[in-house]
Amino acid sequence: MKFKLNDEVKWSSSSNGVTKVKIGFIVEVIPPGVNVKKFELGRLLDAPGLPRKEESYIVCVGSRPGSRAKPKYYWPRVNNLRRLQQKTCALKT
C-alpha cells in the first residue's frame, strides 16, 4: 500500500513483551534503495539506516513539526502501516 505526505497511519510495535499502538502522520517518503540517513529527519532516528527494497516512510508521532512539544519520529515497516480513515462530518438537512 502506498502512502503520501500527511496521511494519518497507525501500527503496533512490541518491546519487552509490551505491545503499543502508535498513531502518527507521514512526514517523509523514502524511495526504494535510499539510505534513510540522507534525509534530515532520518538522522534523528535510532535506526541503522540500511536501505529498504520498497518505498518507506518516516512517521511523526505526538506533536507535529513546528509545535513546541518534541515529536518522536519512527521508520516502521511498511507492511505494518494502516491508513486511518479521514474523518468527515455528515450534515443532515
Image (cartoon, rainbow, N blue to C red):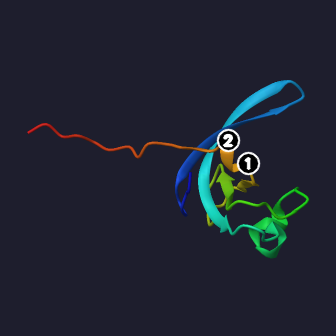
In-image side of 43 versus 32 (left or right): right
Relative to 1, residue 84 above or below: above
- Name above or below for residue 28 compared with residue 15: below
Residue underneath mark 1: 77
- Residue 61 coordinates in the image, percent (x, y): 66, 49
Q: Position of residue 18 (x, y in %)?
A: 81, 25
Q: Is residue 46 above or below residue 15?
A: below
> In the rendered view, would you say 65 is above or below 17?
below
Whether residue 64 appears in this view of the structure is: no
Instruction: Calculate the distance from the C-alpha at mark 1 to the C-alpha at mark 2.
Output: 6 Å
Residue lying farthest left? 93
Q: Secondary structure at mark 1?
A: loop
Amino acid tagged 2 = Asn
**Badge 1 amino acid:** Arg
Determine if residue 5 is in view. yes
**What is the quadrant of residue 16 in the picture?**
top right
Residue at the spot 54% in from the left edge and 62% down from the top edge: 4
How many other residues sit within 10 Å of disc 2, few (<14), some (14-19) or many (≥20)? Answer: few
Marks 2 and 1: in contact by CB < 8 Å?
yes
- Between residue 21 and residue 71, name the one nearer to us: 21
Secondary structure at badge 2 equals helix
Reading the image, the residue beneath label 2 is 80
Q: Which mark is residue 63?
A: none
Image-based side of 9 in relation to 88, left or right: right
